Amino acid sequence: EAAVTQSPRSKVAVTGGKVTLSCHQTNNHDYMYWYRQDTGHGLRLIHYSYVADSTEKGDIPDGYKASRPSQENFSLILELASLSQTAVYFCASSGDRGYEQYFGPGTRLTVL
Amino acid sequence: GQQVQQSPASLVLQEGENAELQCNFSTSLNSMQWFYQRPGGSLVSLFYNPSGTKQSGRLTSTTVIKERRSSLHISSSQTTDSGTYLCAPPDTNAYKVIFGKGTHLHVLP
């Protein structure tokens, strides 16, 4: 059974709309991450968290918010979706300081 | 922060040939993770290798931390090996890893 799940698996959103991507892990891991993947840029870290109720900015946080209401759940929020945020988004979890990461299946977001 | 360089950027093989993928990083730390990604798919962890050599089937990962390099050897390649291989060492000062741009492998039948 998958230890990191994401929902939705794909989404079409309108420019200026609000989008929430959800991630759930059953690994009992403290660390969770949100990445985006674009052709030509590889994987880039948006936000991460190492404890519930706290989030940290990654390398490209602008335009994104994150929420970690519990150890198991980590959400990525696009308050005002833009065309440039069309990408595949991956969630990952890790048990120890970012080492050995486990990825979810990804969410394909298209902003029109 | 950590810098990662993977080579080659792309590789085309005939089925049955072997491949050696390289990953060089700028700061010596104590682990390396290799991932496989099929087009349109998620990242599958192949190896989490603190140091030394690990083997799984036709795949072998060798990491030499003090030389800041890691390699992934694929023996007797198959068409199903086609995809992107990514290495990810930990970053120096944060709770995260840094991804290389990957090696895009295409195995021809």
Image: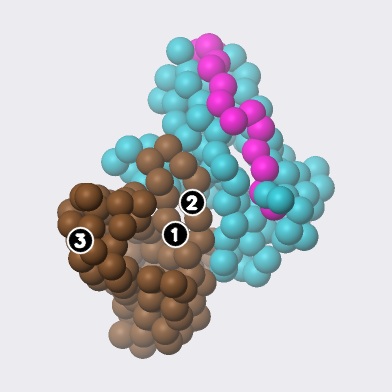
Q: Position of residue B106 (x, y in %)?
A: 24, 50
Give neighbour class at mark 3: few <14, some 14-19, many 20+ (Cα, 10 Å). Answer: some
Q: Quadrant of residue B27?
A: bottom left
Q: Are marks 1 and 2 on the same chain?
A: yes
Q: Position of residue B107 (x, y in %)?
A: 24, 53
Q: Colour of chain B?
A: brown
Who comes first in sequence, dot 1 or dot 2? 1
* Front position in the image: B87 or B3: B87
Who comes first in sequence, dot 3 or dot 1? 3
- Kindly report the distance in space between the C-alpha atoms of the residues bearing marks 3 and 1: 16 Å
Residue at x-position 46% and y-position 42%: B41
User: What amino acid is at disc 2?
Assistant: Leu
**Can residue B66 be seen at all in this image of the molecule?**
yes
Give neighbour class at mark 2: few <14, some 14-19, many 20+ (Cα, 10 Å). Answer: many
Residue at x-position 65% and y-position 69%: A96
Q: Chain of mark 1?
A: B
Q: Which residue is mark 1?
A: B35
User: What amino acid is at disc 1?
Assistant: Phe
User: What amino acid is at disc 3?
Assistant: Pro
Residue at x-position 34% and y-position 55%: B81
Per the rendering, the mark at residue B43 is: 2
Tell me which segment is drawn in magenta.
A3-16
Residue at x-position 23% and y-position 58%: B15
Q: Are marks 1 and 2 in contact (CB under 8 Å)?
A: yes
Which chain identifier belongs to the cyan chain? Answer: A
Q: Quadrant of the N terminus of chain B?
A: bottom left
